[in-house]
Image (spheres, rainbow, N blue to C red):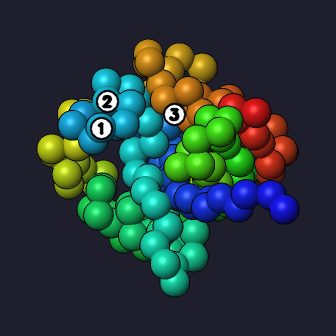
């Protein structure tokens, strides 16, 4: 018999315009503070779909509504034998929405910035850098940390 583990799901939203993506600079979250990351992201709650979580996070973190999500990829990631770090991440892009993206949680986000995909700021959360590099490449399943 093998030990079972819990998988923690999360949704990520990359707002896109032309060849740019909107990123946030994380602060005071306890995870990857000082790193650039998706402008909106968070855990999928019980009874919520990954799409619903992405819409909720875009509203909570950026003040956006009517976001037109496009599923891009799923990433399974781990930190080997640490069960809390067994993750499945759902990555979405959006090119249309209602409202102007703004920092809704200033305690957790130091800055929002439009960044060229070919000139991302440093550092980017490592698994998100992997996802960003894979956007548009047609592979809907990625792994990280294995």
Q: Nearer the viewer, mark 3 or mark 1?
A: 1
Residue 26, percent across and down? 31, 35
How far apart are the two marked residues, 3 and 1, measured between alpha carbons? 27 Å
Q: Mark 1 points at which residue?
A: 30
Q: Name the residue under label 3.
A: 20
State which quarter of the image contains the C terminus.
top right
State whether residue 37 is above or below residue 48: above
Asked if residue 124 lies left or right of residue 112, the reply is: right
Q: Nearer the viewer, residue 128 or 29?
A: 29
Q: Mark 2 points at which residue?
A: 33
Instruction: Name the residue: 30% across, 55% down.
Output: 62
Q: Is mark 2 in CB contact (under 8 Å) with mark 1?
A: yes
How far apart are the two marked residues, 2 and 3, measured between alpha carbons? 22 Å
| Quadrant of residue 56 within the rendered picture | bottom left
Instruction: Name the residue: 38% across, 61% down.
Output: 58
Q: Nearer the viewer, residue 78 or 54?
A: 78
User: Is tag 3's residue or tag 1's residue first in the polypeptide sequence?
Assistant: 3
Instruction: Name the residue: 77% across, 42% down.
Output: 142
State whether residue 144 is above or below residue 69: above
Is any atom of residue 72 visible in this view? no
Residue 6, percent across and down? 61, 61
User: Is tag 2's residue or tag 3's residue first in the polypeptide sequence?
Assistant: 3
Callout 2: SS: loop
């Amino acid at each position: 018999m093998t030990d079972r583990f819990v998988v923690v799901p999360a949704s990520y939203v990359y707002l896109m315009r032309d060849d740019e993506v909107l990123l946030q600079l994380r602060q005071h979250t306890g995870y990857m503070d000082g790193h650039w990351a998706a402008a909106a992201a968070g855990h999928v709650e019980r009874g919520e779909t990954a799409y619903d979580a992405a819409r909720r996070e875009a509203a909570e973190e950026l003040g956006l509504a009517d976001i037109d999500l496009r599923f891009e990829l799923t990433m399974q990631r781990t930190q080997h034998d640490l069960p809390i770090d067994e993750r499945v991440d759902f990555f979405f892009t959006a090119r249309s929405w209602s409202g102007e993206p703004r920092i809704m949680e200033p305690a957790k986000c130091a800055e929002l910035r439009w960044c060229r995909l070919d000139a991302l700021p440093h550092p980017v959360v490592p698994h998100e850098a992997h996802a960003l590099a894979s956007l548009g490449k047609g592979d809907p399943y990625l792994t990280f940390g294995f």
